Image (cartoon, rainbow, N blue to C red):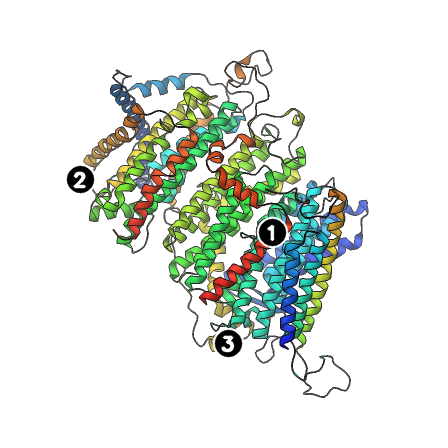
Amino acid sequence: MEALKTLLPQIFYVLIFPGFLFCFIFGLFLSGIDRKMVARMQRRIGPPIMQPFYDFFKLVGKDHIIPRKASKKVFLLAPIFGLISIVIIALFIPIFGFTFQNNTADIIVILYLITIPALSLVVGGSSSGSPFASIGISREMVTMLSYELPLVMIFLAIGRKAGAAINGNVTFSLADISKYQSMSGIMISKWALIPAAIAFLLIIPAEVGTVPFDVAEAETEICEGPLVEYSGLYLGIYKLTQAVKMFIMGSLFVALFFGGSGFSNIYLNIILMIVAVIITIVLSVSFVRSVLGRLKVEQTLKFFWTVPTALSAISLILVYLKF
Amino acid sequence: MTSYFSNLPIIAILAPFLGAFLVGLMGGRKKLLNVQRSIAIATTFTSFLSLIYLIKPVILDKYIVAYWMGNWKPESQWAIGIGLEVDAFSLFTALIIAAACFLSAIYSFKYMEEDNGLDKYYVLFQLLSASMIGFVLTGDVFNMYVMLEIMTFAAIALTSFRNHLYKSVEAGFKYIVIGSLGSSFILLGTILLYSQLHTLNLAQMAALLHGNYTPVSILALAFMLTGYAVKAFMVPCHTWPVDAHMAAPSSISMLLSGIMSKTGVYALVRILYMIYQSTGRPEMEFLIIFWGTITMLVGITMAVVQTDFKRLLAFSSVSQIGYIMVGFGVGLSVNKGVAVVGTMGALFHMLNHATFKSLLFLCAGAVLHQTGTTDLNKLGGLSKKMPYTTAFFIIGTLSISGIPPFNGFVSKWLIYQASFEAGYAPVTIIALMASVLTLASLIKVIQSVFFGQLKEEYKDVKEVPLFMRIPMMVLSAICIIVGVVPNFVSKYLIEPAAFSIYNIGNYIDVMFEKGYAAKMFKETVSIPSMDYTLAGYWNPLSWLILFMILLIALILFFSFGYKSSNNKVIDDLINTRYETFTGGEKEDYNHLGENDMFWGMRQDFGRYFRFIKGAHSGVVNDYVLWVVAACAIVTIYLFTLM
Amino acid sequence: MLLNYIGSFLIIILGLYITIVKKNLIKIVIGMSLMDSGINLLLISIGFRQGGTAPIFMSDLKPGAFFVDPVPQALTLTSIVIGACVTALALSLVIKIKAHYGSIDADKVRRLNG
């Protein structure tokens, strides 16, 4: 009975909030808001906000075809692993001081879990045996390489800043970072970390896979790249993964830079987080998407290894000089 | 001291030597081949078993086993015989070696079927295993050199075993020139140390050299560091293994790449931590960390542009050794808590690297055995014919890049944490980038070899026989199990080994008598505390939740998709419903191989890649010059700072 | 005694020079063997004691006789054997290289590069 008492809240957290159901609903909702904002900025009317839900349910109902050349098991297992890992991250991110797993929140685990969906895209595309997919996965690997470098530096800078106040050295734990923010003000108010925040906003479009960095899934050039042979339920799972990733990156930004304790009521905290995530995604994804075109893959690499790297390197140096 | 387990180390060393001589006596008659194979398997199993029996006294009871050969006990506190001394670190390394030799013996049962001269193969194989185990179990510096030379000979002869291929002979020659250069440096260092201390016993050297360095001993340290760096392939002495691992038969490549490097690392740890006692010296820490970082970078840069399967795996071995050296470098730091984490990360990575690198080489051997080539530009689409090999290779790839449920993640996490807390933030960044580049180079191999389109000439390739699959299965199982329950492995294997690295006093005392170390040191040797937390990984509740999530996912998978509607109408060639989409054009052979991958990156960094690739020119004299230059730089560095 | 040490280091450096500069494979093997000889000379000279005699047990030996150090002499025997083995193995590999490549010039034996 005791075990059931502790188990029941955990099941609730996993399945409903912030586990599967909340991630799916909010992720697809964010994706719909993004499309609507882009359309309005381009003076169109655009699809209704619930359009991604309709897309997903349509895809689930369709038949799926597996090409003769594909290796079936890897082809079918790859999307599921991507989805699982991205949902697991949602359990780790603190919502204004309230984490669901108190001592299992760690930045390096999150860093690796974020690369798993990109990896599942690569392996799924590779196993489908199509030449379009092979070009797509090559570009996807180079894109992944390019945004990992500034992302690592941002995490290290934040870890050093929070750790220097808490235990004299660095920390890797998200719980410590949110404790630091509730003690001494939100992270973005420190001068040394503003370049890091700007760099993180530049990385979000690349992680999510949207213009100007979506060369891996370029619809006009290589027919969706790694996803060209997917159809039916599995294509729906990939689109769902992309939507949930938008939510994860937004809430990671909010937790790292605007975190702390917020209000003390948990329902108000949740609403605050939802609003903050929507604002972040609109700012970094929709504004950029409606204006710019698509970069080539070597331009992507060159961009990421100059501008965001320089910004986060400045941040890291300033943090080490104790600003 | 005369209980049953003091004889076990010598049994572990002698069993394969005896087996080698027996097999050599039997000669080359075909009828006796199966007898020879079973002798090889039996002797490696014997040494593995005797090392397992040693686990209980050494690790569980924390007892150090010492054995003086020929019963030449020390006279009046001076060592005059050769002593074998087994503490937890030696046992840890020896277990890895013995297990790998045993698995390789099983693999070469079927792999070496078409070669002739197999009795010589088994003689050399057993000499290799016996000398590797002897290297880590001995407590005498010159004995280490002799075992090292036996190991080098056996490895060179096995590299050029298939001497009807030109690459084996060329690789063997380069190996012997650079390898014997390294051994000569080690001998020089040993001689110079002997001239200062007049003893050859490790424990006594540690006691006598405590802290008071003379210029001759610093020169000896420089020579020995360079010599063992050649054995443990650190840049710039890394040029011999990439040829040797490519040309050797795969059951030997696995031993050379995964295991022999560990003996070099073992010797470096013994020299730095025990003889020279440089824990707490920032200049040594900086040297080892800097050396490890360069190794990581150069290794993985070369791996991205290779066109041969096994050469790529050898370069990625070089970069993983860089990780281990960074871990041990952090272990020399002044801050005791961080140092312990660094050492434990490095030890864990030794175990993990042996496992997944052996698995990758065995898969490469399976591909070579069935298709006859390892050129990435010629292979393609083998996953439908060899499904087991594909699955094992994917498990190996995920382990080496450090994806969470597999074992690479735990050790790499410890190394990142240790290097960041020790204050070397650029090293953490470079380590993470090297991890992503490792993933990229192995994805390139998977796409070129296993997925994609099958060539006409490989249409009737079959899966490898069962005997070759058994070692691969065992290694994958170890990868997954160590990744899921790292605490178990860490408590029983890693912590006692790390404890014994720092606890020099006990090592010395066992050789002579209690109190000898304190007398020599005139102070007590402090042992840092071993508590740490793998924060965020081991929490039973979170594992239960993960299990539930996986269960839900598998239910989704099996109910929706697996029994798909694709089981009918496969052979209908007119119906293009199940072909891949090519936009309406005719589908010829359009496999994207090695040359077309990562084109963007190779374009951007073209000058950098061309520079490093051109530097590996293939001429022996250049490689020797690099080793000598490394020795010169290390000597100048040590003399200016100590 | 100083002469021995200087001589042995000169021989070692000469052996290294040959291995670095000369292109003929047999000359490289000669250089390796020369380096081994230099190390052996160094090893023997370390064990020398002024006024000592050879460390061999003879029948009419009095206790308290003054030997030179016997340990380096044992080490030198081992090292000479190892040097001979290395030379033999290297030369057999050179024969095989000549059979495959047709020449023993180090600039032509470089098909494994990059």
- Image quarter for residue B541? top left
The circle on residue B623 is: 1
Is there any visible trace of residue A182 in the rendered image? yes
The circle on residue B124 is: none
How crowded is the residue under tag 3: few (<14 C-alpha within 10 Å), some, or many (20+)?
A: some
Secondary structure at badge 2 equals: loop
The circle on residue A263 is: 2
**Mark 1: which amino acid?**
Tyr
Q: Is residue C45 above or below residue A158?
A: below
Chain letter of mark 1 equals: B
How crowded is the residue under tag 2: few (<14 C-alpha within 10 Å), some, or many (20+)?
A: few
Tell me which numbered mark, 1 or 3, is placed earlier along the sequence.
3
Please identify, in this view, whether the residue under mark 2 or under mark 1 is nearer the observer.
Answer: 1
Which residue is located at x 54 percent, y 33 percent? B446
**Mark 3: which amino acid?**
Tyr
Q: In the image, residue A21 lies at what x, y percent?
A: 32, 29
How crowded is the residue under tag 1: few (<14 C-alpha within 10 Å), some, or many (20+)?
A: many
Q: Is residue B189 above or below residue B581?
A: below
Q: In the image, residue B609 lies at what x, y percent?
A: 51, 40
Secondary structure at badge 3 equals: helix
